[in-house]
Amino acid sequence: MNTRPRNRKEQLTDAAAELFRRHGYHGVSVNDIAAAAGVTGPAVYRHFRGKQDVLAHVLLSGLDKFGLVTDEALAREKPLHSLVEAVSALAVERREVTALWRWQGRHLDKADQIKIRKRGAELMGDWITALRDTRPDLPPPDAELLSWAALSVFGSVADHHVSLPKRRFEQLLGQLACTVLRSTPAASFQPSVQDWQRPQVQPSRREELLTIATKLFREHGYRDVSMEDIGAAAGIAGPSVYRHFAGKAELLMAAGYRMADRLKMAARQAIETASSPHDALTALVRSYVDIVSRSDDLLSVFASEVGHVPERDRKELVRVQRGYVAEWVTLLRTVAPQLPEPEARIAVHAALTIVNDLTRTPRVTARPGLVAELTGLAVAVLDEAAHI
């Protein structure tokens, strides 16, 4: 007689967490979750009301796991050191768990959003307290910035598939996170581009629609935005949008290519005007932070909605994205030839994720020197990797 496993709900949760990490919420169906767990679609409904309920359980159970590890670490003799070690191990063992705090919960109902935000705030409070116990002179806002950045280092492993032997992987993540936690936010990396006021240029209607569409895609998700929504936000009738774009997919592709072009041009300029490999790497970081801080909606769409782009264009955008990361890796290994390629790649993803995450974290985006601070943190992570 076949009996249903007692941990079936946990199996479904683990399968869903990995699928959501890889493909995003809209890229995963109930049947996908069932297949990954080795059951049929209807079996999922014995444990969950639907996909939204699965996501809520994934996020809450993941935060609980993160919280359990945090509580155990804080009870030890050196809380912050123990916390870094414990979360490094968790990040390597369960890549999806350490990235869950990023989710804004826009796909969940209000009650679940409140639960997730409350639990996330509690965990962040634990990190800030542990950091300030170690560095009592650190102002609370700076402690919060550094804690977010450290979590980005751990969460960055969810954005790539690079791996190392378990112990070495944990050590590397811990070293990079400790570098962030030891940092002092400073304005010394302030790019000169921020020192002047750009003239205001009236955008074309096509440019205006692209800007509006990417903002809506970021806030609501590609599938939940219609051409009529885009037209309404621009103050024109929905059908008028089709004079400029054939459909949503073309808008999404335009957003992806726009971001890719900006990054490529800035990278070329940064490298060609640098006086040394390290200067080139620092300039590359500065250019990235500047672009992301001014193009956050484009970045979000480029990173999270690319799965909705037609396959041919999607492959090209992914190729461009990987090529950009490879440029960082090459520069870092030019600075530090002894650094193994996988470790360089992990460090680069950690630096990029700090910038990507913190430019989208409302708690820190109001900091007046954020562009300079993010540049400094990202460079510090890369320098740490170069000297390991």
Image (cartoon, rainbow, N blue to C red):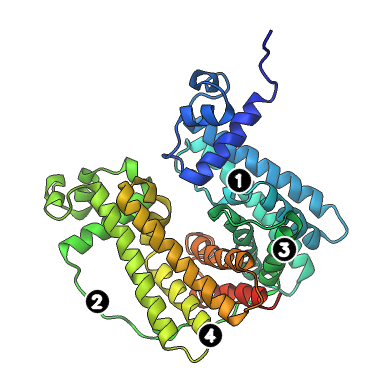
| Residue position marked by numbered label 4 in the rendering | 277
| Residue position marked by numbered label 2 in the rendering | 200
Instruction: Give the quadrant of residue 144.
Output: bottom right
Q: CA distance from mark 1 to mark 4?
A: 44 Å
Q: CA distance from mark 3 to mark 2?
A: 44 Å
Nearer to us: label 2 or label 4: 4
Label of residue 174 in the image: 3
* Residue at disc 4, secondary structure: helix
Amino acid type, callout 3:
Gly
Q: Residue at x 20, y 48 (%)?
A: 232
Q: Residue at x 47, y 78 (%)?
A: 284
- Vertical position of residue 189 compared to residue 260: above or below: below
Nearer to us: label 3 or label 1: 3
Q: CA distance from mark 3 to mark 4?
A: 26 Å
| Residue position marked by numbered label 1 in the rendering | 118
* Residue at disc 1, secondary structure: helix
